[in-house]
Image: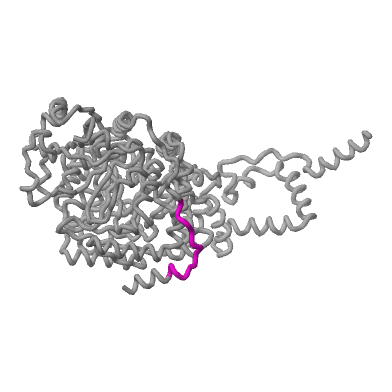
Amino acid sequence: MNHAVKAAEFVANAERAHWHDQALWFVREKRDKVVHALPEWETLRETAAAVKAYTVAHLADLLEQFEENAIRLGAHVHWARNPAEHNDIVLGILKQHDVKHVVKSKSMLTEECHLNPFLERNNIDVVDTDLGERIVQLRNEHPSHIVLPAIHIKKEEVGELFHEHLGTEKGANDAKYLTEAARQHLREKFMNADAGITGVNFAIAETGGIVVCTNEGNADLGTSLPNLHIACMGIEKLIPRAEHLGVFLRLLARSATGQPITTYSSHFHGPKPGAELHIVLLDNGRSDILGNDDFRNSLNCIRCGACMNTCPVYRRSGGHSYEATIPGPIGSILNPIQDPKKYHSLPFACSLCGSCTDVCPVKIDLHHQLLTWRREIALKGCLPLSKRLPIKLASIVLKRRWLYNLAGKLARCLVPLMPRFLLYNRLNDWGKQRELPLFPKHSFRELYKRHKRINMDGK
Amino acid sequence: MESKHHILSAIRQHKLDGRELPNLGQDWITYDNLPEQFATMLESVGGQCVFANDPADINVQLTQIPAYTEATRICSLIDGVGDSNVDLNAIDDPHECDDIDFAIFAGQFGVAENAAIWVTDQNLKHRVLYFIAQHIALVVPTARIVDNMHQAYEQLSFAEPGFGTFISGPSKTADIEQSLVIGAHGARSLTVFLLPSAT
């Protein structure tokens, strides 16, 4: 995949790209407002980062502690090395309970594992219950943002979609009306579900409990009605103690949507009476990241999406241009770890402005890691010719003083005389939206020499 | 079992420096007037805060709430508060809670910084009631409002199996073009009655 190519498709519709940019900036501004109201924000970030660093350094012990406590509370714990194992485990549990209909609340991890299509292939009906996720599911798309899955879709399009699938009035596109229609439609799904699948925001080693945060209440409805709850989590979601939730719950919603906390922050300790709770722990490359000094602290991520809302590239190119489960700055770090060849262009979808690093609630040094990735990608030989060749040329020229001087002279003489088509063509990506500056008659060295001479003469 | 072993040894092969857990006893935010701060935050997250004198006053105040006066099925978990006509303990299947219009619960404590109220499934047969009822009200003594989430967790222990959640405002979504809509899947409204002392 190539981010620049996909992004070009997105920005081709300038009006829409602008609208998308503004929608996300609105969320970033809401975040700023609540963050600035808390004098201890920086202390909170530092504390959170330190808790995560401790967790990562003791992850194996903490995972064992978590498993032991979760089992003591009556939950079942499963371990999956990769998405295939994860999906088999989930399917096995569902089959054991003869489940036909599943309601799912938001879980980027099940997106990572492509759980929905897998279950559908096995004749299990899966309904995403987060409104944004339901919208993208009905459109046969994937979320374009990890917190705001349908941020790329306009209300007119939702109106059309709901008219087709939920029978709302044609042309009706009032958000309130459409949300009410979804509420009725999904209430029916909740009532008919045999099992609820959720993600996990935090898992507590000390207690064996899990915490799931939503604004809609869909995770709670989905797990309080049926007698089977399957919670899927990456192994990095662990925190050592319940008291650490005080830190993370203060950071999460403020960073994500500018709310002081999500509407529901639900703590599940064991199954509901008479029911079963299964917790599936997924590795899928996370243990490798843990061993990598450059990218280790990307495991701090609590999936708030703040880096996306602030990123000038993400805002203007849309989540789908990353062609990955997790887009944006954090995705541009995590995806190349999974597949550097496929995702080689993502670390370059970045202006290195550092805004993501500034807003990250768990202090991931995102833009530094993105810069590191550029070097890694070159070393791995994953750079395309269009980048390799100019760098090679530059290296030849910059190593030789005479050649550098000659190239400068030639450029100053010839470029102003060259016809446009020679300068601005498909080989010049840089010039697609930019004009070359006027070339000076003399180089800096020439000017410097002349000034020195004049000064000497003057004495 | 094999996967567990594999994952744990994959993690353990990376020897990382033992780090210390940070000190959580920081100078976290506090408020001069906890009930006022709580009420302001609750309004900002879409809830209504009502200062009541006593349970009898709550009953008077309830008659001012259209969602309550228009409700057919009311389930109150607090003796003497609300005209409860649903006996939750007589319901076996939680799905049957679907037609409950208004539910009233006791909240354990509130948090001033974000208007969250801690509720649990202790002595509650169907925890789904918090989420499935069309409208809910929570009753919390003002004396049980803490400043921030750190103080909140000092109040909590998770030694026993159980369910608990912080509820901050009514259910909501902004998934359609960032327009805030109250009443996504859970309660369409949340009223919090603050009582002057632990009654």
Examine the image and state in which quarter residue B78 appears.
top left
For the point 78% across and 41% down, which residue is it?
Answer: A442
- On the image, the x and y values in percent for residue A401 come to 78, 55
Q: Is residue B21 magenta?
A: yes
Q: Quadrant of the N terminus of chain B?
A: bottom left
Q: Is residue A15 visible?
A: no
- The segment highlighted magenta reads B10-22
- On the image, the x and y values in percent for residue A342 come to 46, 61
Q: Is residue B58 magenta?
A: no
- On the image, the x and y values in percent for residue B187 come to 20, 39
Examine the image and state in which quarter residue B134 appears.
top left
Nearer to me, A407 or A232: A232
Q: How is the image coloured?
A: one colour
Task: Please give the count of numbered marks on the rendered protein.
Answer: 0
Examine the image and state in which quarter residue A234 appears.
bottom left
Magenta: predominant secondary structure element?
loop
Q: Is residue B45 visible?
A: yes
Q: Is residue B69 left or right of residue B197?
A: left
Q: Is residue A450 left or right of residue B85?
A: right
For the point 58% across and 61% down, which residue is it?
Answer: A378
Nearer to me, A230 or A188: A230
Q: From this viewpoint, which residue is outermost toward the front?
A: B198
Nearer to me, B144 or A64: B144
Q: Quadrant of the C terminus of chain B?
A: top left
Q: Is residue A280 left or right of residue A165?
A: right
* Vertical comparison of A454 with A212: above or below: above
- On the image, the x and y values in percent for residue A149 come to 34, 46
